[in-house]
Every structure is written in C-alpha cells, then in structure tokens.
Amino acid sequence: MGEPIAVDHTARSVRVCAVDELAPGAVTKVNTLPAIAVFNVDGEFFATSDLCSHDNSSLSDEGYIENGEVECGWHMAKFCIKSGVVTAPPAKTPLRKFDVRVEGREVYVQVPEGILIRG
C-alpha cells in the first residue's frame, strides 16, 4: 500500500505544545499550510500531514485514533501514526511524516521549507 515518504531535514522548528497539553491518544493541529497533525502515541510524539491522502479530510478534526493508527472519519482509510503508511483502504498514498522532538517539557515539529507557518 505504499512506502512511507521520507522526512525533509531542511526544516524550521515550530513549538506545538507543552508535553502535558497533549494526552496519550490525542492529536493537535499545527497552524501551517498545509496543516500538520501531531499525535501522542503512548507518550511518544509523531507528526504527519493532517489531510487524508484519499479525500482530504482533516485527520486531527475528524479522525479516530486507536492502537497507533488514525482512521479517516470520511471513508475509513487508516494510517500508521508512526510511519504514515496506509494500513487500510481506500487510501493508497502514505501520509507525509515530519520530525518531532521534545526539549524539556515542550514539543516541537520540524516544518520543511515550502510549508507556510501561519501567525
């Protein structure tokens, strides 16, 4: 169903939230264009594109998170949060991944050139 898309290492660091502001099993949307979703999976943080690759539904707003996967609320495509790989159709294209790091108690996502960081 497709290999994960490589992470772009020429990126800018953007603060997402404090570690304790994103509970395990939760997701938040980063104010970028296109949007980035940051997930807490059992205390580890991962970031992917926010839009389902099948039909552009917001995974942070309309997705369901379970067992390390996010399911699109529109057509039930599923993706591995850690890798972005498609785990259930109808999606065929993996989600783009972004590097995430924790510094102290703050979560940051690396936003590559070409993605607009909003206000």
Image (cartoon, rainbow, N blue to C red):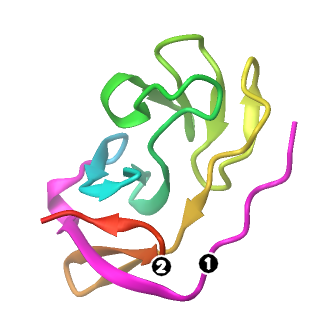
| Image height of 72 relative to 76, above or below | below
Kindly state the secondary structure of the residue where label 2 is placed: loop
| Image height of 110 relative to 116, above or below | below
Q: Residue at x 54, y 88 (%)?
A: 10
Between marks 2 and 1, how big is the CA–CA gap? 9 Å
Kindly state the secondary structure of the residue where label 1 is placed: loop
CB within 8 Å, label 2 to label 1: yes
Residue 60 lies, in percent from the top left, at 35, 36
Q: Residue at x 73, y 60 (%)?
A: 5
What residue range appears in magenta? 1-23
In the foreground, 76 or 22? 76
As drawn, is 105 to the left or to the right of 89?
A: left
Q: Which amino acid, by three-letter code, is at mark 2? A: Glu
| Image height of 112 relative to 82, above or below | below
Residue 7 lies, in percent from the top left, at 64, 73
Number of residue marks = 2
Q: Is residue 13 magenta?
A: yes
Which mark identifies residue 76? none
In the foreground, 12 or 97? 12
Residue 26 lies, in percent from the top left, at 31, 41
Residue 11 lies, in percent from the top left, at 47, 84
Q: Quadrant of the C terminus?
A: bottom left
**Which residue is label 2 attached to?**
113
Q: Quadrant of the N terminus?
A: top right
Q: Quadrant of residue 45?
A: bottom left
Q: Which amino acid, by three-letter code, is at mark 1? A: Asp
As drawn, is 17 to the left or to the right of 93?
A: left
Q: Quadrant of residue 25?
A: top left
**Which residue is label 1 attached to?**
8
Q: Nearer the viewer, mark 2 or mark 1?
A: 2
Q: Is residue 10 magenta?
A: yes
Q: Earlier in the sequence, mark 2 or mark 1?
A: 1
